[in-house]
């Protein structure tokens, strides 16, 4: 009974009413007013470095820095080939996450300095894990 109630509460929180109150909203990131989620690249960091977004959301990485960065899927300098973009200062790169999963990414130039992050897309409510 307790477990059942918890899931009902979680579903209500995810579905919400009107404005989105998904877990991603509390991790320092921001929705762009539409269906997108924003991550800023600056000072050799992605902010927020850990983001949780709903399936089907588009994440836009903005380079708000004065130097080039890349948004490259993979980790530890090993690209997976899912996405890989050089983003110049003032530019942005967007990717739509259609499939649940954990998506680590890094900057090719600065990953050794810790410039990396992860986008997590939880399975939709009701799906079998
Ligand atoms: Cu970089």
Image (tube, rainbow, N blue to C red):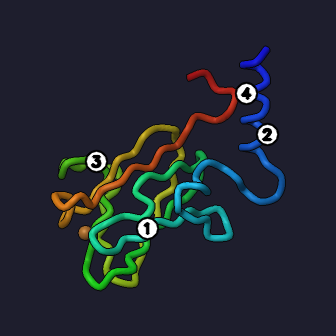
Look at the numbered discs 2 and 4 and tell me whether their residues touch, using CB distance below 8 Å.
Answer: no
**SS of the residue under disc 3:** strand
Q: Is residue 17 left or right of residue 125?
A: right
Q: Is residue 20 above or below residue 93?
A: above
Q: Is residue 120 left or right of residue 76?
A: right
Quadrant hosting residue 30: bottom right
Which mark is in front, 1 or 2? 2
Which circle's residue, 2 or 4, is located before the other in the chain? 4
Question: Which residue is identified by label 4?
Answer: 7
Which circle's residue, 2 or 3, is located before the other in the chain? 2
Which mark is in front, 3 or 4? 4
Q: Looking at the rendering, in which quadrant would you find the N terminus?
A: top right
Q: What's the distance in space between the residues labelled 1 and 4, CA to CA?
A: 32 Å
Question: Which residue is identified by label 2?
Answer: 12
Q: What's the distance in space between the residues labelled 1 and 2, CA to CA?
A: 29 Å
Question: Which residue is identified by label 1?
Answer: 61
Measured from the top left, where is residue 47 in percent x and y?
Answer: 42, 64
Q: Is residue 113 above or below residue 6?
A: below
Q: Residue furthest right?
A: 17
Look at the numbered discs 3 and 1 and tell me whether their residues touch, using CB distance below 8 Å.
Answer: no
Quadrant hosting residue 127: top right
Look at the numbered discs 1 and 4 and tell me whether their residues touch, using CB distance below 8 Å.
Answer: no
Number of the label disc, if any, that sits on residue 74:
3
Q: Residues within 10 Å of mark 1 (few under 14, many from 20)?
A: many
**SS of the residue under disc 2:** helix
**SS of the residue under disc 1:** strand
Determine whether the beta carbon of the residue marked 4 sits less than 8 angstroms from the nearest atom of ligand 1: no
Measured from the top left, where is residue 71 in percent x and y?
Answer: 32, 62
Q: What's the distance in space between the residues labelled 3 and 1, CA to CA?
A: 16 Å
Q: Is residue 69 above or below residue 23?
A: below
**Residue found 34% across the figure and 74% down from its top:** 42
**SS of the residue under disc 4:** helix
């Amino acid at each position: 009974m307790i477990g059942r109630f918890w899931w009902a509460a979680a579903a209500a929180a995810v579905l919400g009413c009107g404005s989105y109150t998904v877990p991603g909203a509390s991790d320092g990131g921001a929705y762009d007013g539409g269906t997108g989620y924003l991550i800023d690249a600056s000072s050799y960091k992605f902010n927020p470095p850990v983001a949780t977004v709903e399936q089907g959301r588009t994440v836009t990485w903005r380079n708000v820095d004065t130097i080039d960065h890349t948004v490259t899927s993979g980790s530890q300098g090993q690209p997976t080939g899912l996405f890989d973009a050089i983003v110049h200062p003032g530019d942005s790169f967007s990717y739509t996450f259609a499939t649940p999963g954990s998506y680590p990414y890094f900057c090719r130039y600065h990953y050794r300095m810790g410039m990396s992050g992860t986008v997590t897309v939880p399975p939709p409510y009701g799906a079998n894990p």
